[in-house]
Amino acid sequence: ALSVAAGQGVFSLGRVQTPTLVMICSRYLENRNFVPVKFWQLKAHTVSGGIFFNVQSTAKWEQQPEAIAALQRVKDAGQLSVKSVERKEASQEPPLLYDLTTLQKEANTKLNFSADKTLSIAQSLYEKKVMSYPRTGSRYISEDVFDEMPERVALLEQYPRFAGYAAGLDVAALNRRNVNDSKVTDHHALIITENLPGELSKDERAVYELVAGRMLEAFSGKCVKDVTIAVLSAGDTDFTVKGSVMKSAGWRAVFGEQETGGDEEAANLPPLQEGDCLPLSGVDLLEKQTKPKPLLTESSLLAAMENAGKELEDAELKASLKDAGIGTPATRAAIIETLFARQYIVREKKNLVPTDKGLAVYRIVRNKKIADVEMTGMWETALAKIEAGSMDADTFRKGIEVYTAQITAELLLVQLSVANGETCSCPKCNNGRILFYPKVAKCSNVDCTLTIFRNKCDKQLSDKQIVELVTKRKTGLIKGFKGKNGKVFDASLVLNEQFNVGFSFSEKKAKPKK
């Protein structure tokens, strides 16, 4: 229906594909339209027991004069007094084993692999019998599989990267956090098999090491640290600092990873006591600004798909999407690839950014049921009732048919418009308006022949450039055209009296004679 409304090209929708596109578009627009707000904080420098460290103000000032006044009061105080010191032992459980989605997220973050590429590699490792079945939604293993883990850990003593750690891991006291028969679905979590890998490609080895390393992490002990949180004061301003000392690396020793603290965290703090007075070595006024939510990457999109439904208010719908999200571990990569194939999104470095076409579809469907996670929740609830025998499958089917007819009727009433809400009328017939497609822009009037191809001498024209060409009959200077001889040139485009597109070259000014 959307393709018919558009008049040309393929515009696909789907109960998972469309909410996923909406996630990408809404985050992109939120990020692009974000207006940063400035604020100020103080950072003070001090020393105790020969250890220099910094503390940061708990207050954030939205007005610079107020921050400057606080800065002066801190300077006038000349010292920092310790108001409170909290010491505690903090332990961090090892991460759970991978299911497919968490493996795809990790591979995207650490290796910059797409979800589809990770699935393909995982499938190859499975076929080579060195990794378990990849299309799993479970992060747990059963008791009988756990019985095989000492053997799998011992196998990694022969794998150079993990040999040292595997040899030192007590296989008689493996962490049982991942063992839960009730949470194992059709397939258990991703683990290595009893076969040591032979010849692997670079990418296959990278994914194998993620899975093998995560398996070692999952069966290791907790990471334990001594954490100190201190509050200091100067004038009427409180400052805070957090320090930590590793007692036992536990699972973090597998890859040797350390958590990175914020600007206010020190690796180590001196032994502070409440009531201590410390010298003020200096104080800085820091100008900062609020930051927008980042654009989605494949990793964060997979997480959003996995966690979709957590914001729903309806308890039954929320329960239907709990531990499931939208899509399945086996289909999420394909859904993302479909958005690429439909030219709804593109990659910019690691970020997922909607195209003009994707944004146009988003503006049409964003307030409709097909774009709503709630609809997926309703369907998942109905399917669960059918499985339990409390709903007739034919009733569900008839409901889907009614819904399909409604959404089709809605979509047939819409038209795709220019990205960013711009519209322009056709200068040739003065009746139609310009519609934008991936390869062309053309008049909506079927009797009008105005067509502008996006690709001009190896240069892809944007919607904005086409709007300028149609409304002003000439664009500004466009750089990067490539001639048949391979030479690159710059020119403006013009729409002549016959409504054909041509080039206009600016005349070079003659250099004045000396």
Image: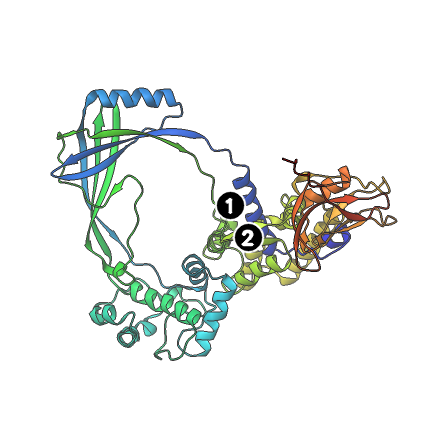
Other-residue count near label 2 (Cα within 10 Å), few / some / many at <14 / 14–19 / ≥20 = many
Report helix, strand or loop for mark 2: helix
Residue hosting label 2: 377
Q: Is residue 232 left or right of residue 50?
A: right
Residue hosting label 1: 312
Q: Amino acid at mark 2?
A: Gly
Camera-nearest residue between 404 and 371: 371
Q: Quadrant of the N terminus?
A: bottom right
**Image height of 99 relative to 11, above or below:** below
Provide residue 502's location: percent of width, then percent of height. 78, 48
Q: Amino acid at mark 1?
A: Leu
**Image height of 97 relative to 501, above or below:** below
**Image height of 253 relative to 232, above or below:** below
The circle on residue 417 is none
Q: Quadrant of the C terminus?
A: top right
Quadrant of res 51: top left
Q: Residue at x 37, y 78 (%)?
A: 197
Tags 2 and 1 touching, CB below 8 Å: yes
Provide residue 110's location: percent of width, then percent of height. 40, 59
Q: Give the farthest residue toward the front.
A: 514
Q: Exactly how many numbered labels are in the figure?
A: 2
Q: Is residue 388 left or right of residue 266?
A: right
* Disc 2 from disc 1: Cα separation: 9 Å
Camera-nearest residue between 26 and 162: 162
Report helix, strand or loop for mark 1: loop
Residue 262 in sight in this render: yes
Camera-nearest residue between 96 and 33: 33
Other-residue count near label 1 (Cα within 10 Å), few / some / many at <14 / 14–19 / ≥20 = some
Q: Is residue 394 left or right of residue 235?
A: right
Q: Residue at x 36, y 64 (%)?
A: 97
